[in-house]
């Protein structure tokens, strides 16, 4: 695992998957900070995306996981912050490329788009894939 300090958050649509991801990572002895929500009650996804992004900016976490219904709203919100590269990951290739080419630091997952097994798989790819640097580093500097 390339990151040692990981945080996670969701909205109400992503709550169940967030909890399953947390359990999965805890069973693998991966420390994780849950930034909410703590129930399935309706919440606004931007509030939770901002919590994860700000935690990374303050260097309290190295990487983040955001879960909503599609992954899109979380990614849009998190990417408003400088130095945040939140990637909506929906298959193996999109997940690996988000790390290799974009050095993504937040994985965004859609609970209505993928199942638990896929989510766990994408998280493994995300947290174990190295950034390739080189020409990709120059491109990221342009963001």
Image (cartoon, rainbow, N blue to C red):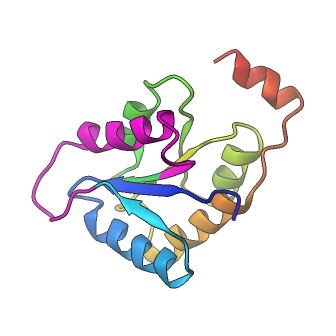
In the picture, which quadrant includes the N terminus? bottom right
- Looking at the image, which residue is at 77% across and 45% down? 100
* Residue 103: % across, % down: 69, 40
Magenta span of residues = 36-64
Find residue 89 and report its horizontal and vertical position in percent.
Answer: 55, 52
Residue at the spot x=25%, y=53% of the render?
11
Q: Residue furthest top?
A: 142
Residue at screen point 70% across, 47% down: 99
Question: Residue placed farthest to the bottom in the image?
Answer: 27
Q: Hey, which residue is sitting farthest left in the picture?
A: 41
Q: Quadrant of residue 5?
A: bottom right
Residue 68 in view: no
Q: Is residue 40 above or below residue 90?
A: below
Q: Residue at coordinates 59% horizontally, 64% vertically from top-left?
A: 122
Q: Is residue 14 left or right of residue 71?
A: left
Membership of 96 in magenta stretch: no
Residue 43 in percent (x, y) is at: 15, 48
Above or below, 33 relative to 103: below
- Does 65 sit left or right of 13 as displayed? right
| Residue 58 sits above or below residue 98 on the image | above
* Most foreground residue, 70 or 2: 2
Residue 102 seen in render? yes
């Amino acid at each position: 695992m390339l990151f040692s300090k990981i945080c996670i958050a969701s909205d109400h649509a992503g709550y169940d998957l967030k909890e399953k991801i947390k359990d999965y990572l805890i069973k693998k002895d991966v420390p994780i900070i849950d930034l909410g929500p703590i129930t399935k009650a309706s919440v606004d996804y931007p509030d939770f995306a901002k919590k994860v992004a700000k935690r990374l900016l303050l260097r309290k976490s190295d990487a983040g996981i955001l879960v909503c219904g599609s992954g899109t709203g979380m990614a849009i919100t998190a990417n408003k912050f400088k130095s945040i590269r939140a990637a909506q990951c929906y298959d193996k290739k999109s997940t690996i490329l988000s790390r290799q080419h974009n050095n993504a630091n937040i994985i965004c997952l859609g609970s209505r788009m993928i199942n638990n097994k896929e989510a766990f798989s994408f998280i493994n790819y995300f947290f174990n894939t190295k950034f390739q640097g080189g020409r990709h580093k120059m491109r990221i500097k342009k963001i």
